[in-house]
Image: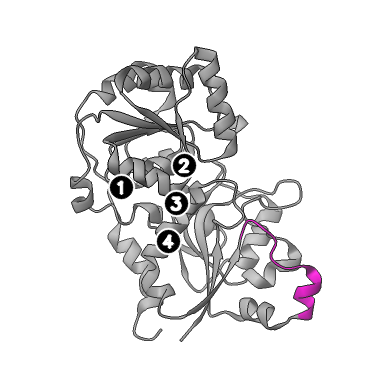
């Protein structure tokens, strides 16, 4: 038996997309997680005070000395901001012993930058394992992790690992009657002009329309867009349970800028068009052939894409996934 520390990226999050990632990791790493003793901590919050860490009670010692420490996905690799790494992974010099020798599972980057600043290099260099091969979700993250002296394989995001050819064959190729949309309400991801075009196109091509709300910012932004174009508010979806219910019971396509909303739709056998707004969706396309449409092309191409017939052909690097997982499932473990 091994003692496992699972650092949960869906605890304390403000983005329900992290729950989609964590659910997929729990399923795809189940054979590892269920075969050993494991305890969980969050990445989004600072779990212990400096006083607790210095006191080194049994909980602290467990996480400091765990045999395997897994960091469960999402956009964790980032530059330094305001004296810390990023809000998704609370890393400070005082708590590095908790994370020392951790292994990434399908992690990505917050920004499209290849080089890290001095402080970020120092922090990641202290916590990322040099012994085990890390799982990353795109080539950019792979290069960054390798630049730290670590080993990495591009497995793609774990949310895509189950989208086998057999699964994709069950996703419709033609237009559905209804649609689930999403918009990204973070200020640096807004584009009122193109997003209103997307909404208008969806409204005239589908019957019933729902909106997947992945963050509270998405709700506010969508309400602003609806008022701008005089559109009657669409029905909101706030929980993954309700999202799954709509996807599996309402004959829907998914169209929107929320990347993992689109992946969740594919998991539930719904045709999906992810509107690409940054390097993350582009990385999913380059690594796994995720069906995307750059937002700059929405006005000229979205309506034709909606009314065309296309197959979903997610390409999974099964060898890379097997290489990563074999470190923890072999006979010696």
Give the crowd class for mark 1: few <14, some 14-19, many >=20 residues within 10 Å. Answer: some
Please identify, in this view, whether the residue under mark 3 or under mark 2 is nearer the observer: 3
Q: Nearer the viewer, mark 2 or mark 1?
A: 1
Q: Using a 10 Å C-alpha cutoff, classify the residue at mark 4 as few (fewer than 14 neighbours), some (14 to 19) or many (20 or more).
A: many
Residue placed at 60% from the left, 47% from the top?
14
Which portion, as a residue range, is magenta?
43-55
Secondary structure of the residue carrying numbered label 3: helix
The residue drawn where x is 53% and y is 23% is 191
Q: Is residue 315 left or right of residue 243?
A: left
Q: Is residue 249 at all visible to an observer of this figure?
A: yes
Q: Which residue is mark 4?
A: 25
Looking at the rendered image, the disc whose residue lies closer to the viewer, 4 or 3, is: 3
Residue 20 is labelled as: 3
In terms of sequence position, does the residue under pointer 4 or pointer 1 come before the other? 4
Mark nearer the N terminus (4 vs 3): 3
Q: CA distance from mark 4 to mark 3?
A: 9 Å
**Distance from label 4 to label 1 (Cα)?**
16 Å
Instruction: Look at the numbered discs 3 and 2 and tell me whether their residues touch, using CB distance below 8 Å.
Output: no
Q: Which mark is residue 102?
A: none
Residue 61 location, x and y as percent?
A: 67, 81
Q: Which residue is mark 1?
A: 268
**Secondary structure at numbered mark 1:** loop
Q: Earlier in the sequence, mark 1 or mark 3?
A: 3
Mark nearer the N terminus (2 vs 1): 1
Q: Which residue is mark 2?
A: 280
Figure check: 244 above or below 257: below
Residue 251 in magenta stretch: no
Residue 54 belongs to the span the image colors magenta: yes
For the residues labelled 1 and 3, the Cα–Cα distance comes to 12 Å
Q: Are marks 4 and 3 in contact (CB under 8 Å)?
A: no
Identify the residue at image location x=53%, y=53%. Answer: 144
């Amino acid at each position: 038996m091994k003692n496992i520390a699972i650092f949960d990226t869906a605890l304390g999050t403000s983005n329900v997309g992290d729950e989609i990632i964590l659910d997929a990791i729990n399923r795809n790493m189940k054979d590892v997680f269920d075969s050993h003793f494991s305890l969980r901590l969050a990445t989004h919050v600072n779990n212990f005070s400096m006083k607790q860490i210095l006191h080194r009670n049994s909980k602290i010692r467990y996480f400091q000395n765990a045999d395997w420490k897994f960091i469960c996905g999402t956009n964790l690799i980032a530059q330094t901001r305001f004296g810390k790494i990023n809000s998704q992974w609370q890393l400070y010099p005082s708590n590095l012993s908790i994370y020392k020798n951790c292994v990434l599972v399908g992690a990505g980057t917050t920004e499209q930058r290849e080089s890290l600043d001095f402080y970020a290099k120092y922090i990641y260099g202290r916590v990322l394992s040099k012994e085990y091969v890390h799982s990353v979700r795109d080539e950019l993250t792979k290069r960054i992790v390798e630049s730290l002296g670590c080993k990495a394989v591009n497995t793609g995001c774990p949310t895509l690992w189950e989208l086998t050819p057999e699964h994709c064959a069950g996703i419709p190729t033609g237009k559905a009657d209804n649609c689930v949309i999403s918009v990204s309400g973070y200020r640096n991801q807004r584009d009122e002009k193109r997003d209103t075009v997307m909404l208008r196109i969806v409204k005239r091509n589908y019957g019933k329309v729902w909106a997947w709300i992945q963050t509270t910012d998405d709700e506010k932004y969508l309400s602003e867009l609806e008022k701008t174009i005089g559109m009657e508010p669409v029905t909101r979806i706030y929980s993954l349970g309700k999202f799954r219910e709509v996807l599996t019971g309402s004959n829907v396509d998914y169209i929107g800028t929320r990347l993992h909303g689109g992946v969740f739709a594919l998991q539930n056998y719904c045709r999906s068009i992810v509107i690409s707004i940054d390097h993350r969706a582009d990385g999913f396309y380059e690594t796994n052939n995720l069906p995307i449409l750059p937002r700059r092309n929405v006005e000229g191409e979205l309506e034709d894409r909606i009314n065309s017939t296309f197959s979903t052909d997610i390409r999974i690097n099964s060898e890379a996934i097997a290489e990563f997982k074999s470190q923890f499932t072999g006979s010696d473990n």
